[in-house]
Image (spheres, coloured by chain):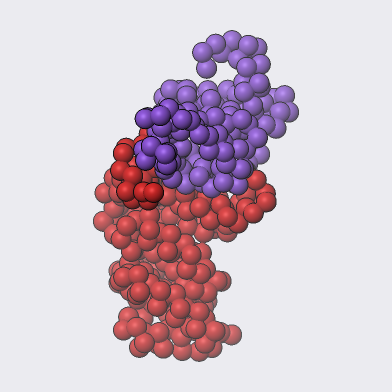
Chain colours: A red, B purple
Amino acid sequence: MRTYHQLTDPDRSGLPGQIGAQRQRVAERLAGVRRIVAVMSGKGGVGKSYVTANVARALARAHKPVGVLDADLNGPTIPRLLEASPSAQAPAIGLDGVKCISMGQFLDEGAPLAFRGPEAESFVWRGAMEASALREFLGDVEWGELDLLLLDLPPGMQRYIELCDILGNPPAVLTVTIPTPESRDAVRRAMRAAVERGSALLGIVENMVGREFVGTAADDLAQEFGAPVLARIPWHPAPGTWNELSARL
Amino acid sequence: MKFLCVECDQQMAFGERQLPGDGTLAATFKCPKCGRVVAMLTNPMETQLVSSLGVEIGGRTVPAEPFEMVRANVVTGGPAWSNDAQERLSRVPSFVRGMVKKIYADYAKERGITEITPTIMDTARAELGLEGM
């Protein structure tokens, strides 16, 4: 009996062709985007979205067109940080003219992300559903010409891996950590995964520096991965902090 | 996935797709040599998995709308669309599909209808004079 790859007649479903068309749509949408940078950390609560929003605003103030894709589908915060309209306009326009897209624009106020579908074994298809949402955010937003598209990732590595698959090429990575050894250990795993996937490491931002969180996470990671420490952000950053950081990207 | 008629050693060709409205899917495949027809029946979870990928068994008849998956599947305060209602909506020309969808959604919302089905669409069409939509 012949096997799958031995059957070469064209079929009407053309599923590989449909997937290919999806990827082509993403590539065409992002053709005007000069750089794509994923803001990531293996650790939650270190301020990725905060850093993302403020870097984007600083670039926009410097007259560089910039967009933010909120890839944290289950905990979207970018619309609030950028004070973007909660409407499903795509892209929404936030503070200083930053373009953005977020699941927060599609969800009712305070509602968790939920998909229609059979509840039993929903874990089987929910991941695919989230990856498709991410693909639509990349491929269906009229980004236009952008100097930089920042991808604000949730904690963990899953979304980064999905992005690599959808984009075809791994995005450059900006890593955010807090000073503690616990954060360092989690972020190390994320950076290692990024290196293994072929992402360029732009550098490390150490956030929430100077109070309760004590440690040398940024320096440790910089030495281990040969990536620069781009900024150490205190609890109350000076006005020029974000301009300086954005200029180093 | 592909289907092989073992007796004829022929790849079977897609015939038709049906969405009965209970979350399942039926698709038929026919052997071009002997004419034998088989049906592939998927359960709701399998149907949902394929749908999650943004692809359609049998091929797309119309191009995907922007945010098609998100708008159709993310739960919001608006009415849900049954699979067969979605299928029917997909046959509306894309340039008016958004408007037609909103008309049906508004109709359901005004009447407290939580799920739009082909029956609801028929009723709305008759009441609102939407022949052809």
Q: Nearer the viewer, residue A101 or B55?
A: B55
Residue B105 image point, x, y percent: 61, 28
- Left or right of B69 in this view: A18: left
* Percent x, y of residue B116: 64, 28
Q: Name the residue furthest front.
A: B7
Q: Please tell me which residue is depicted at 50% across the width and 34% down the height of the picture.
A: B38
Does residue A7 appear anywhere in the picture? yes
**Number of numbered labels in the structure image:** 0
Residue lying at 39% horizontally and 64% vertically, measured from the top left = A38
Q: Is residue B70 left or right of residue B24?
A: left
- At 57% from the left and 38% from the top, the residue drawn is B41
Nearer-the-camera pick, B57 or A166: B57
State the residue at coordinates (31%, 39%): A9
Query: x, y percentage for residue A246?
Result: 34, 67
What x and y, as percent, mark residue B51? 51, 42
Q: In which quadrant of the rendered image does the N terminus of chain B lie?
A: top left
The answer to whether residue B72 is seen in the rendering is no
